[in-house]
Amino acid sequence: MSDARTTPEGRAERPVLLTVDDDPGVSRAVARDLRRRYGDSHRVVRAESGEQALEALQELKLRGGRVAAILADHRMPGLSGVEFLERAMDLFPRARRALLTAYADTDAAIRAINVVDVDHYLLKPWDPPEEKLYPVVDALLEAYAASGDHEVTETKLVGHRLSGPSHALRDFLARNQVPYRWYAADEPEGGRLLAAAGLGPDDVPVVVTPDGRALARPAPGDVAAAVGLSTAPAEDFYDLVIVGGGPAGLGAAVYGASEGLRTVLVEREATGGQAGQSSRIENYLGFPDGVSGAQLTDRARRQAAKFGAEVLTTREAVGLEARGPARLVRLDDGSAVAAHAVILATGVSYRRLGVPGEDAVCGAGLFYGSAAVEAPACRGQDVIVVGGANSAGQAAVFLSREAKSVTIAVRGAGLEASMSHYLIEQVRAIDNIAVRTGTVVCGVQGEDRLERVMLLDTATGTTEEVPCGLVFVFIGAAPRTDWLDGAVARDPRGFVLTGADLLVDGQRPAGWSMERDPYHLETSLPGVFVAGDVRSDSVKRVASAVGEGAMAVTLVHRYLERL
């Protein structure tokens, strides 16, 4: 609390007993009596006006604290006790309420009980408290305990259910393993949080940090800094910079840091990459019961941190160049990070549908990946999953637990060409999953949210309009390598060439400065290596990406030994 009389004691771990009286002597006396009896289990906060008490309640609301009971004087200048309690109910509806009143105001206090649902009134003076104060407060606290109220100390996110910006922040927090609680702006608790922050529905999405700061429509970088994610390098020079935090990048970070290299990983969104968004990975070595992408990512990130690897979030690499023996990675905020060697593990991004209406409903019913984040919205709904690879099958299986039905729309004649056998068997065994082959999405429609999907039958050329509010797209991926143009050699599709693929008729690539051929995972710029999906002709599997990350670190050591 900002006011010294609120006797702050750090975070709101104990429920608050709030007393409000404009007479300083009475205010101190009631707070003293409350602390004597309830101080071990409750935090006693006092205020000397209704306005001051509302400020205290707003701060408590943003911090996720609890208010067990409020005792307010009936006659106060400015806000009266009744007016104050009425506004306090908007912030903490479960708090129990009592009026402090003189004998002459008893009738008014009784009327107030009916107006604002006051639980009790207390006559002043209340001596002895054992007879006149504590029994009433005991009853208030018993009623509060029965309400099941609890403290919310996580990051809080207030937004609209089907909104692109709100979805983007939910996805960002979830993928970065930031504990948060979601509140819809049109529901009572979401409205209370907005009111406490002095904001309205037009200001969402709003992120409220555990220390009570409210950020309206924040950029991911602002959220990252507010919730404690690292966004700036701690050093000027490293042994190894890894660009990309998917399985390949995390694997390289674990092996690089564990082997003594000063290692920093730069990730533009969230660690885990596409694998991190997978609802279930069942063919990864060592997990016979399967593991979610989020769990695997969390373990890998913690493992990298354990060995001393530094992870920068919401920082995008925009340039790569050689500075003598150093390799410089330029970042989107204008800064740069330098190292002896670089591993490119930027992975790939989901391809977009490229159909009319797509931009208007992206994040508002149309999603690229992110099935785990949006699964609760699928309860009882008809859902379409677009794509025929493992990521689409995993999403369909996961969503089928909540959805009324799931339709997999796949361009090909079946799933066998692109989906693992074990996953095909799972899909076939689930009654509410249907596979629609030879089908592509040719259009989406909706005003503020997705409402209809246009499906094209590739065999007959006919188009069908299907009412649908939720579509998840997994139709392949494109490499994130435009920023490498002119820095390293790429194939016609944009994937990075390495090793023997760089040799043409036995000749090394133009500008190659070493008296040896490029190593297996080395690019056309010596000291810059590639791991995972972004490498030309790589195997698109989590296990192979992790293996390449480890192999790339071995080659980095070999490169450094010969500098």
Image (tube, helix red, strand yellow):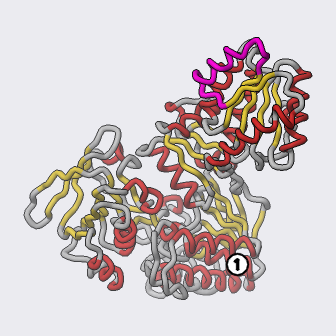
Q: Is residue 299 magenta?
A: no
Query: Where's the N terminus, which quadrant?
Result: top right
Q: Quadrant of residue 345?
A: bottom right
Q: Residue at x 20, y 68 (%)?
A: 436
Q: Position of residue 211 (x, y in %)?
A: 73, 44
Q: Is residue 108 magenta?
A: yes
Q: Quadrant of residue 324?
A: bottom right
Whether residue 472 sits left or right of residue 2 in the image: it is left
Question: Between residues 557 and 252, which one lies in front from this camera angle?
Answer: 252
Q: SS of the residue at dot 1? A: helix
Q: Position of residue 152 (x, y in %)?
A: 65, 49
Residue lying furthest left in this view? 460
Q: Dominant secondary structure of the magenta stretch?
A: helix
Counting other residues with Cα less than 10 Å from the Cα at mark 1, is it few (<14), some (14-19), or many (20 or more)? many
Q: Position of residue 449 (x, y in %)?
A: 34, 43
Whether residue 29 sits left or right of residue 357 in the image: it is right
Look at label 1 and name its amino acid. Answer: Gly
Q: Residue at x 30, y 63 (%)?
A: 386
Whether residue 288 sits left or right of residue 232 in the image: it is left
Residue stretch in magenta: 101-119
